[in-house]
Image (spheres, rainbow, N blue to C red):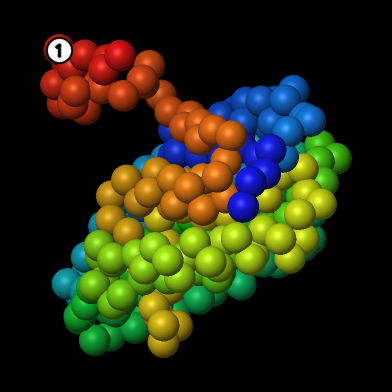
Amino acid sequence: MKNEMEVLKFGGSSLVSADAMQRVRDVLVARRGTQRIVVCSAMGGVTNALIQIGLKAAQGDAGYTDLLDELIERHRKTLDDLGMASDADVRSELNGKFDRLRSLCAGISLLEELSAKSMDQLVSFGERLAVPMVHAWLDMAGLKLRRVDAREWIVTDDQFGAAEVDREASARNIQDGVLVDDSFEVLITEGFIGKTATGDTTTLGRGGSDYTASLIASAIEADCLEKSTDVPGMLTADPRMVPEAQVID
């Protein structure tokens, strides 16, 4: 399969706020003309917040509800800041996800147990909340969009927390999935998440969105895979932890 198509991955720092999302849209609008598949992470900090919420809920700490309210309000405020206060479709979708997220956390709190499977379900909401927002935001710019749930493409085993990808099955899904309707300018999907053969949501471990993007780029033989981030390149270490980290040429 060979397409004149690019894969772009936007990490949490590229989606951390309305201002950051504005820059993402500016990039995609300015570079119209080449088909792109855009892989989105959760908004910056959301995955860590979800983990903290889950741990507090499992400990029977009622304070998890305050953290959950803050996370939900952050997403709602971002919609407002993007000027999508009146977009009933995206608000309805997000409200449905917020309700499911609340129910999941209530169940974790009631059982006082957070299994690896439940944790994957919980943290998957980061990407699953970000993608509807990015989709609606790009739609406002008049781009011809298509949206795919990454779990339809990425097949994994059931090693929750760091699932192993079935690369052959995933590649077939990606290739067939793109060809179903390849008239888009931008196709948007989630990074980091997949699904088992029995339909359970899994995550690919930290850095999983980069892995998702590389799987897609490889499957479609993309012209390039481009990763947007807040550092100047591939580094020898995390510069937040190792100030002397160097760019690898």
Amino acid carrying mark 1 in the image? Glu
Image quadrant assignment for residue 137: top right
Is residue 16 shown to the viewer in this render?
A: no
Q: Residue drawn 47% across and 32% down?
A: 227
Image quadrant assignment for residue 91: bottom right
Seen in the picture, residue 21 relative to 151 is either above or below; the reply is above
Question: Horizontal placement of 189 versus 181: left or right?
Answer: left
Q: Total marks drawn?
A: 1
Q: Residue drawn 73% across and 33% down?
A: 34
Q: Residue drawn 42% across and 66% down?
A: 168
Residue 222: x percent and y percent?
Answer: 57, 41
Instruction: Give the labeled residue for mark 1.
Output: 244
Q: Residue drawn 50% across and 76% down?
A: 100
Q: Residue furthest right?
A: 142
The residue carrying pointer 1 sits among few (fewer than 14), some (14 to 19) or many (20 or more) residues within 10 Å by Cα, namely few
Foreground pick, 206 / 34:
34
